[in-house]
Image (cartoon, grey):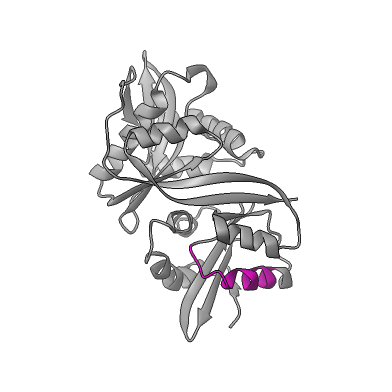
Amino acid sequence: MTWTFTSDIEAYAGTAEPWLLRDPVRNTVPLTVLRAVRSGLWGDDVLLGRLERDGRIVATAIQTPPHPLLLPTIPADAVPELATGLIEIERAIPGVSGPLPLAEAFAASWWRPEAKRRAERLYRLDALLPPDPCPRGASRVAGTDDLDLLVRWGEEFQSEAEGVAPVDLTPLVASRIARRELVVWEADGRPVAFAGASSPVGGMSRVGPVYTPAEFRRKGYGTGLSHAVSAKALTEGAEEVLLFTDLSNPTSNSIYQAIGYRPVADYVSITFA
C-alpha cells in the first residue's frame, strides 16, 4: 500500500490521533501540532499523511508550512515510501524533524541535499527536584497584557533556536495564553523570562519554549521557570512531562537533568538546501 495525503483535518484526526496516542511520549510533537491544526492554527496548505497496511494505520506524517515535515515513531521501511510519495505529488518540503534514524533515512531518500541540522534530545521528567539555588523572583501565569512582549520574545527564541526568520507568532501565543499554557518569571517587578507547557493530551505535557533574553541570562531564571512549568503541568494532570533540548547547548541539558529530567531518545531537525 502507498501513502495517502489529505488536507481534511477532522477525517485525518479521527484515525491518526488514536494511532499517535499509542505512544504519546515519542509522538509528543505530532500530537500537539495536530491539536493546534484542529483548533485553527497553521491551516494553510497543511499536509496530512497516513500509511495503511491490511486495513490498519501503520504510519502517519504531518507538515504545516513553513515548518518541516514531522515524523512520529513509524516503521523504518515506511520512510522511503513517504519520500517517494511526496516527490510524486511535488510537495515542497523545507526540512524534516523526528527521531534521529527516521529523519536521517528521510533525508537520504529526499531529492535535495542536507544544508544544516540541529541535534536534539527528548527528555522525560522522572522526579521533579527544586532548583538549587532558587533564583530571585517568582513565576505567574501569563495574561493578555503579556501578548506583545511574549510574541517578541517568542520570535527571538525561534530565530536563535532555529536560525530562520520567524513567522508571525501572534495567533499561537494568543491561543496559548488563552489556555493558560505560558508562564512568566518576574524579578524586581519586571518580566525577565517566559516558558510554556502544553495542556495535557494523552496524559502528556511538553515544556517549551523556555526563553530568557540575553540581558537577563546567567541568573537562574530559566531553571526556576522550567521547574515552575513542570510543577504546573503535574498539577494539571500530566502523567508524563517532556521537553526537548538542543544538544549543542550543554548548559540547558545539565539544567534540566538537575531538576529531574532523564533522556528518552535522540531527535534531529534537518533543513534541506
Residue situated in front as seen by the camera: 23 or 93: 23
The quadrant where residue 158 appears = top right
| 142 sits left or right of 51 in the view | left
Q: Residue at x 69, y 72 (%)?
A: 84
Q: Residue at x 53, y 33 (%)?
A: 249
The quadrant where residue 183 appears = top left
Q: Residue at x 59, y 58 (%)?
A: 103
Picture coordinates of residue 61 (x, y %)? Answer: 55, 65
Whether residue 228 appears in this view of the structure is yes
| 60 sits left or right of 194 in the view | right
Which SS type dominates the magenta stretch? Answer: helix
**Does residue 92 show up magenta in the picture?**
no
Picture coordinates of residue 27 (x, y %)? Answer: 44, 59
The quadrant where residue 77 appears = bottom right
**Does residue 75 show up magenta in the picture?**
yes
- Image height of 10 relative to 37, above or below: below
Looking at the rendering, the stretch of residues picked out in magenta corresponds to: 73-86
Quarter containing the N terminus: bottom right
